Amino acid sequence: MQIFPCPFCGPRDEREFHFAGELGKTRPDTRDGVSDADWARYLHEQRNEKGHVREVWMHMPCSELFVLERDSVSMAVIGSSPLRGAAE
Amino acid sequence: MSAHRVAGRGRIDADAPLNFSFDGRAFQGRRGDTIASALLANGVRVMGRSFKYHRPRGPWGAWVDDPNAIMNVALNGVELPNCPATTTYLEEGMAARSVNAFPSARFDLKGGLDLFHRWLGAGFYYKTFMWPDWHLFEPMIRRMAGLGAVSDAVLEGYVADQLHDRCEVLVVGGGAAGLVAARSAAEAGQDVCLVEDHAECGGGVWQRAEIEGTAPADWVAAQVAAIVAAGGRVLTRATAFGVFDHRMVGIVENRAFGQAPRLRRMRAGRIVLASGALDRPVTFANNDRPGVMSVDGAGEMLARYGVLVGRRIAVVANNSAARAVLPALVQAGAEVVEVDPAAGPIRVLGAKRIRGLDQGGRRVEADTVLASGGLTPLVHLWRHAGGKLDWCDARQAFIPGRAPEGMVAVGAAAGAFDLESALEEARGVARGGAVEASVSHYHLTPLWPAPGAKGRQWIDFQHDVTLKDVELAARENYVSVEHLKRYTTLGMASDQGKTANMAGLAAMAAIQGRPIPEVGTTTFRPPFVPIPIETYHGAHRGQLWHPLKRLALEEAHRAAGAALGEYGGWLRPGWYGQGDVAQIIAEEVRMARGTAGIFDASPLGKIEVMGPDAEAFVDFVYYNTIRTLKPGHIRYGFLLSEGGAVMDDGVIARVDQDRFVISCSSSHVDGVRTHLEAWRQDGNDPDRIFIHDTTQHWATVTMTGPKAREIVGALGLEVDLSAEAFPHMRLREVVWQGGPLRIARVSFTGDVSFELSIRASRAEELWQALIAAGAPLGAGPLGLEALSIMRAEKGYLIIGKDTDGETMPHDLGFGIPRQKKTVAFIGDRSLHNAKANSTARKQLVGLRVAEGAVMLPTGAHVVEAGTQRSLGYVTSSYDSPTLDRPIALALIEDGVAQMGREVTIWHLGETRRATICGPCAFDPEGERLHA
């Protein structure tokens, strides 16, 4: 079982967290004629990288989203930071 | 009797006799015995029958590596299946039964199966029982194969404790290397925990005459005392069975027989693996006979239990470690003859009783055969953690290679089979030094299965896999070890191939003429030893597994005779009173339609959205336009996923300009809150929106029915309740008895309704006041079942019941925002793709059956004539007490365009007819709602 560091609550058991998405996905402006292909890419395409990943997670007890950097192969946690002001 | 007890030897308590039985015969063992050692001490060798061929079997090993001696054990009314006799400590009164044997292991009626072995090889069942249908044969085969049977009795109190723990250094294995590693680390000031699976630490030390100039007992006691004195912990009868992410080690702690083992989840800063090594079998003909044991197993039996396994022992070994065990056997009185395995093919003579060995016509008389094909380090945990293995030619074994982070192997587990160097290295490693395992004095002659050899040579004892099965698999091209494993079931039994895997992959390597490391190993997976499912389960049952949310009014409901049940995670009243349930529910509906019903709607979501950007936010998260909603007004709407599917429905009230209350479905509150939070923080300015779930802060009591206004009026509220002053879909905030009361005119029944929300702590006062006001008019409490019928009469839907994961709002008759809403909202783009625009979408409609017909079953399919293709299904179906006829809702392809059409309904082989109609069966004009 993994331990994730919530930037607000500290290290907690993985069962308290929900994966929200990969970092860097931006919702297309739907008032601006988004093509089927672009919308499908937004909905379904994931980078699913091997190795160093940056993801958005929610710590359920405090409901805060944050950026989790980890290694998808070794499961090592590299760090976490609040989502606010996160660079793409 | 060849095996017997030697006085004065072993760690057992000779003065503590324990009575037990095996297959109905009475025996006596000693405290400290395992079932297997006690039986051997009594001269019993046949302890079970094999899985497939029903061959007689006795123990091969003395501990977790034994694949053969598996028993059902009963004590004090508790019976547990598949207990390994070599690791189950004897207790007074135990009754052990051999498994897969009838009437007993000695005389097994199915022993004749072994005569048909030629036709029972790998893949036999798959090939033979294909025609006409495997399922015809399966029950019989399942009865004939397999091991223990589970007792039907429920084990009261068999609940595993589960602990969370941490330490700086976890040492796995309490043998010599583990003890000195733990001691060094503890004395260096680290928080150390050592786990040892035997009842006593010491490992292979007990087989030695002395260690570092001291008697084994004194040496072991001194190490344990030093660890404890330095603040370390020593857990015995505790097995580290798996390493999981972030160095969480699963430890199972065995307790007295019949008590569920305890699970300790140990978070270790560093893991020192000192799990030792196993003696591996030698593959020769009839190497599975009872009385063929590992050399190390015989050494352990003597050292720990004072059992000498034979009187005249033939030894087939290829290595120095095995030879080092022999003097102790001789000293205990055995006559030992070494047989060089390189001198020719070996065959065991005798069946239930061994008569000797035959090697190329030369006969060696013996009552026992000990074999050792070399030591295999126990690297399971190393592999769980992602450590690599290196092949070592000198040892002919896989030894730990590149280490996983925070883990180090010492002693025999690291390939240091020589005690002196193992101790030195373990001390160094515990202080943070590097491993420099040297082969030192250990040497062996490679000895692996020889393809094409005569006779039946066992590879996997527990699953009855022979060398011929491996050869067959290779011929049929199952050459990858993972395929070999699954085709022959090699290594898939409860021992997980501890003795079988190396022989199996070496056999495959030999057949293909490839080096062993090229063939590779199968994946090592937890658990290292069999563990009762209960251990993982622990106290997570009932309320501790799935805690129900409780109503503030629960006591009032109980007092009113409510039948409480789970509805969407809440314990809620289904109906009130006892008797014919359908009748009671119908009466409640008639009461609510005739006068009024009062129901507890507290679980309805009350998520507040506040702040300067709240209006834009709710407009974005809702399908419907919310920005035009005026303060004090309420609107019904949908929340969609980005895929356009309806996620939840409910009303949203605007309390004032910057404050909304979202009333989502009772069972969706947590999901909706999370959904809103995610969008608030990602894509919006979280400083300008605040979301607060107040669902549990307010209790909601709803009065519904033609007399609802009159009853609520009796509360004497400072508000005009008339239809003109307080119409449908309006919100009022008033003060009642000194506290705030929120009144919403919304309806889930189609009748005039007032939803009264009050501070949860004052719910009882409100409930009693309304009950008291309603009673004289014949109004009373209304359960959830009656409410479900009333909403279905009106065609009001329940998300997840009357919708599925593909339902979009326009399938439910709410198409306007899809066409007209001009600002962006969640799911908007998905409502305009090819699938959303299709005419073949499933739409919500009603179904009507012919006069006098019974109601349709929920879940029945609407099928296309001829093809029988499903066009949709019945989502809700009830007998309507109001209309005195069945009603139903359904999702049907292009259903709205087919009003009045008769369709075919199919359910479990029966066909019915029904007519498509509008979903609203009662008061379609809504006169009652606005009355």
Image: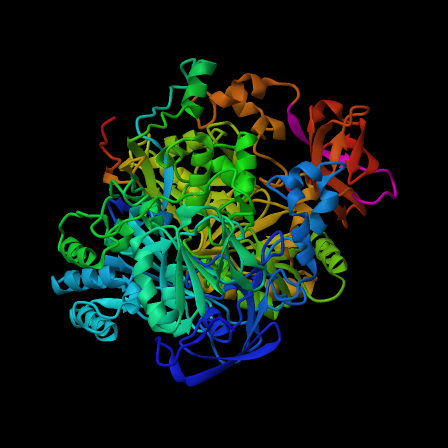
Query: Of all residues shown, which one is farthest toward the bottom?
Result: B15
Seen from the viewer's position, the closer of residues B309 and B707 is: B309
Outermost residue toward the right in this view? B852
Q: Is residue B118 above or below residue B828?
A: below
Residue B661 falls left or right of residue B147: left
Q: Position of residue B385 (x, y in %)?
A: 32, 45
Q: Residue A69 at what x, y percent from top left?
A: 26, 36
**Which color mode does the image show?**
rainbow
Q: Is residue B399 left or right of residue B800?
A: left
Relative to B804, residue B581 above or below: below
x, y percent for residue B604: 51, 49
Magenta segment: does it hold B843?
yes
Q: Quadrant of residue B372?
A: bottom left
Q: Nearer the viewer, residue B926 or B868?
A: B868
Residue extending furthest toward the left: B188
Tag count in the figure? Answer: 0
Magenta segment includes B308: no
Image check: B685 left or right of B892? left
Magenta highlight range: B841-855
Can residue B705 be spotted in the picture? no
Q: Depth check: B450 or B127 in front?
A: B450
Residue shown at 51%/27% (left/top)? B644
Which residue does the image show at 57% across and 30% down from the upper left? B806
Q: Is residue B808 left or right of residue B296?
A: right
Indicate the quadrant containing the C terminus of chain A: top left, top right, bottom left or bottom right: top left
Residue closer to the observer: B781 or B500: B500
Percent coordinates x, y for residue B185 in the rendering: 16, 60
Q: Is residue B146 visible?
A: yes
- Residue located at (47% from left, 23% from top): B828
